[in-house]
Image (cartoon, rainbow, N blue to C red):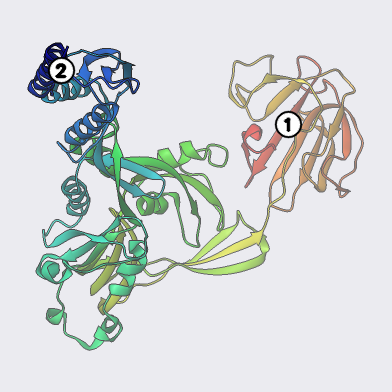
Amino acid sequence: MKILTKKRKFTYIWVSLFTLFVCALFLDGYPVFRSEGENFFHVYLNGVEMGTVGDRGAAEQMLLQARKEIAGQSDDIVFVDADLRLVGEEIFWGEIDAQEDVYAHIKAELAQSVRKTLHRAYTLKVNEYMVNLGSTAEVQELLQDAVDKYATEDIYNVELLQDTGRDIRVLTADVIRREDAVSHKDEAVGRSGGIDRVMSAIDVTAFQEEDKEFDAFELGLKSVDFAEKVEIAEVYLAEEQISSLEEAVDDVIKEQETVGEYTVVSGDTLSEIAIKVNIPMDRIVELNSDKLENESSMIRVGEKLVITIPEPELSVVRTEDNYFEEAYDADVIYIENNEWYTNQSVVHQQPSAGFRKAIVRVNYLNDTEVSREILKEEVVMEAVPRIVERGTKIPPTYIKPISGGRLSSGFGARSAPTKGASTYHKGVDWATPTGTAVYASCGGTVSKAGWGSGYGYVVYIDHEDGRQTRYGHLSKVLVKAGQKVKQGEKIALSGSTGISTGPHLHFEILIGGSQVNPLKYLN
């Protein structure tokens, strides 16, 4: 019995040692079964099996490391589909994959599952306009092109500086002389748009330069800046949202037509306004067809005209000192006459141009001159002003003298409708039944009321603006010579007396004793 017991004990020891040897030999490939739950995991990424691991945390750590490695390959923001799923089981014997193989599979799957990459970009903002570029170098080149379009001397640089007044990373642009570029490198700014800055940059000694000789002035470009506030913000965008430099330059610098308004000032004419705003006269007439009939139409002080202004998205303001030798006109001198109408005027003195030489400081917005200041002037020959006396009273208006009626004959040349009628019609005719009421087109004094050769029964009315109206071929006259009538007052009944082919009203307006087309004067 003792011998048998020792043999069994030896066999137990031998089996135990063999088991421990096998476990030690294959420890990396076969987890020890301890009946502690799931100990063998199949790893799936985006539905694709990556391999097997013996620990859930190991798979999650591999995914995290792979994502970091892919994201670290560029400065851009990378979005990747990464749906990790682990299917676990409890086993006694099982072989797991090498960690480096599982990691390689996970990394490869992530690389081909990149959904979107947001690239670092820079948004240039000018008022409400924005454009996205790929680098600050491109932003700077765009802004430099905008400056170089007007500052052709090539002495101004655009520098991008940190805006210290902002919590986020925002840059702003500064336009400086190239010789000052080094001293501006480390500056930080927080400022507004360029017009105020350009104006403040003008040397205050400009107002004291009258005593300087002409050759002592330094001529040319004095200052340049952007008219609007320029901001550049760092952002991350999809590739399709980022513009090329060529597209951005075209969009930002090219001129766009915007609607503007011009207020007529004393002495203005349409031709002078066309020169001021750099728009052809016919275009101004077209834009203001409700006010202007043609290029000879009258304009009044204070009247507002619609104009189109070509402007780029980013405007540049600049100041130049220039030397001029020029003929010049003195301002027109107006004498206001409250007894005259605005369509009445008399020239008392004809003008004569003068000649002068001058140093002039000119302020520009893009290519448009916005103001000028004479720093020094020497008049070689004085200009003689034009002196005009003009009326201030608004002239009376004219209305159609009948209600309804059909325009049967216009003003001007015509075929004679009947014997004795003129081939040049000096008024207009409205066909209307006999007895239709005829009204005064404008208030005034009746100068004739009765029979008139050719006109039949006729009424003449003289008006305060020097004009006269005539109403012919009447069937009955209701007013007398010398009688005062108001606009719209009933003065006669229509008919077909005199040289006439049928019932109608003949109507004339005379200016300076000559008939004009009445239709041009009726409201």
State the residue at coordinates (75%, 33%): 400
Asked whether residue 357 appears in the rendered view, the answer is: no
Q: CA distance from mark 2 to mark 1?
A: 146 Å
Asked whether residue 342 appears in the rendered view, the answer is: yes
Query: How many numbered tags mark residues here?
Result: 2
Label 2: state its secondary structure. Answer: helix
Residue 48: image x %, image y %?
25, 12
> Residue flagged by tag 1: what amino acid is it?
Phe
Label 1: state its secondary structure. Answer: strand
Task: Point out the image quarter for the C terminus.
Answer: top right
Query: Is 158 on the left-hand or right-hand side of 336?
Result: left
On residue 316, the disc is none
Labels 2 and 1: the sequence-earlier one: 2
Viewer-side residue, 223 vs 408: 223
Report which residue position mark 2 lands on. Answer: 9
State the residue at coordinates (31%, 55%): 170
Question: In the picture shown, does residue 5 fall above or below 518?
Answer: above
